[in-house]
Amino acid sequence: MADERKALINKQDSSASISSRENLPNKELHPYGINDDGSPEKTRVPREGFDSITIESEIDKSSRKNSRSHLVLAICACIFGSPLQIGLNTGILNAPQEVIKSFYNQTYYDRYGEQIEGTLLTLLWAFTVSFFCIGGMLGGLLAPAFAGKYGRKKTLLLNNVIALISAALQGLSKTTESFEMLIAGRIVVGVCCGVVSAVGPLYLAEISPTSLRGFCGTCNQLSITIGVVIGEVLGLSNVLGTAQHWPILVAAPALPAIFSFLTLSWCPESPRYLLVVMGKEVEARKALKWLRNSENITEDMDAITLEWNEHRNAPKVKVMDLFRNPELRWPLIICIVLQMSQQFSGINAVIYYSTSIFTSAGLSTEASELATLGTGLVNVAMTFISALIMDRAGRRTLHLTGLGGMFIFSVLLVICLTLQSSAEWLSYISIVAVIIYIVFFATGPGAIPWFMVAEMFAQGPRTAAVSVSAVVNWLCNFLVGICYPILQKAITTYSFVPFCVMLALFFIFTYQYVPETKGKTITEITMLFRQQTDSHSRPNDYFSPSVVQYEVLVDEPSDADNSDERVKRV
């Protein structure tokens, strides 16, 4: 028997990926049906009374590239139709800020015969920027109900109607001579983007295999950064950022909504939603076969079925249950802090007011607009690189790297802006500091908070947890949008000091408490938090590779009494 097995292994040596586990005779390599290296289907060879080994089949290896085509189509349909709207609506109002303020002033003068006071005009503009975030919070609160009732795909499709309504409100504001319509349109489009921010990462996480979950999640942020760049390009004074064309600019987010209608309609619903929430196994298999472009979906279905079995036996989870249940409370706290680390890092202060930051650094208005565009392009490039290395380097490592780098260059930015009056060359150093700051943001904090929340919760509490995270993110976004202009006016060049302090605190928290989830199934991750809660230890203690990784029941008959044997992997 041993000779036959040895011959078989030698025969497959060129393509074999051999793994073993001690004392697990005749059983699956991985307790949840997904191999440690994240590879697709495996051909298992039982070994009587010895280790289990796996040999990758030539069929899976040769068809792996082809099997990705449908998944790529679904990812592109999602990210370029929905998350792109978030970035586009964030970037379009940056460069034409003064043009739209002039519209506010002229409209006010036509009504009341006097100019708007400077303070009131600043406040109106702050409302225009920040009411987008209020709508985002409302959308984040509505997202769980819609995603649970209508599904992830249908929610994203219906949400495009809201995008079209907001585009009409904003685009017609000049024709109707009503800046109130523009502000109302910003609230409505905020609702649209709030729903997208919660449901988009959810859909991407649920359609992606474990080995590509980090890449797919980062694609959500990649789309947002691309949207910001497109918005900044369209907002340039020689494109649409003029007194005549800015209504077309603010209506531009209708285009990705139309794209979503035309493309996402052909993609399937999330297989996890179909099986775990709706209990439709046949439809879930059909969706999974389309996404994998393969009939061989055994391991993916095993993982989803395991989650389904747990979901059926678990009570329905509401938002308040996340705070009451100790097993859910700690991952929720981690997700909330991750979202705060993204917004309170100061990134939106850079995006919203980057042009004025560069102007204060000594650049002309035109040069400042181009510098702002350059930071957007850097953000896109680094987010793409982050997507490629996310599943190799790990979430925790990249997030720590990003926070540490942002802290260093935020401090450098404050120093340069403060001392530039005595040394003109420091204004150029401040521009470099902003660009490198963007690089570190894109490395980790830009993408990781959005999709990591979907990794830390099982199907039952996942939608509620994503909603809470989205609301926290938009709330922090709102606070930055409202407070930073006031802060900048009050303490000028020291306006980034509070962000420096918070970046240091977020780095310490991440180092101490945020676990690494790379390469683990969602069931494994939730079990680890359960073990951590039972033992009252820190998450990193249980997520460390040097200790117990998971616990699983193996139905292996005992020689003595045929009872189930509990096995722990160490």
Image (cartoon, rainbow, N blue to C red):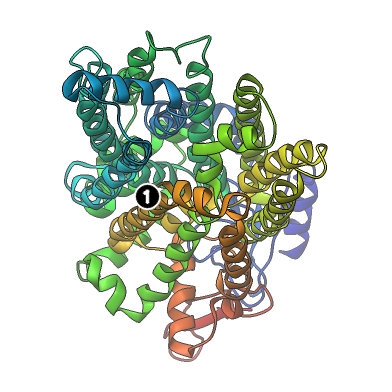
49 above or below 491? below
> Residue drawn 36% across and 41% down?
119
| 475 vs 327: above or below | above
Q: Nearer the viewer, residue 77 or 250?
A: 250
Residue situated in front as seen by the camera: 415 or 259: 415
Circle 1 crowding by C-alpha within 10 Å: few under 14, some 14–19, many from 20? many
Residue 538 percent location from the top left of the image: 55, 81
- Quarter residue 250 falls in: top left
Q: Position of residue 426 (x, y in %)?
A: 79, 41
- The amino acid at mark 1 is Phe
Residue 29 in view in this figure: no
Disc count in the image?
Answer: 1
> Considering depth in this image, is 18 or 207 the residue closer to the camera?
207
Whether residue 110 is visible: yes
Relative placement, left or right, of 53 versus 420 is: left
Question: Image quarter for residue 172?
Answer: top left
**Residue at x-position 35% and y-position 23%:** 253
Residue 107 percent location from the top left of the image: 24, 21
Q: Which type of secondary structure does the marked residue at label 1 adopt?
A: helix
Q: Residue lying farthest front?
A: 114
* Residue at horizontal 76 percent and vertical 43 percent from the top: 420
Give the x, y percent position of residue 1: 71, 64
In the picture of the structure, the residue carrying the numbered disc 1 is: 478
Q: Quadrant of residue 30?
A: bottom right
Q: In the image shown, does 262 or 397 lie closer to the viewer? A: 397
Q: Residue at left 50%, top 30%?
A: 228
- Indicate the quadrant containing the C terminus: top left, top right, bottom left or bottom right: bottom right
316 up-or-down from 450: above or below: below
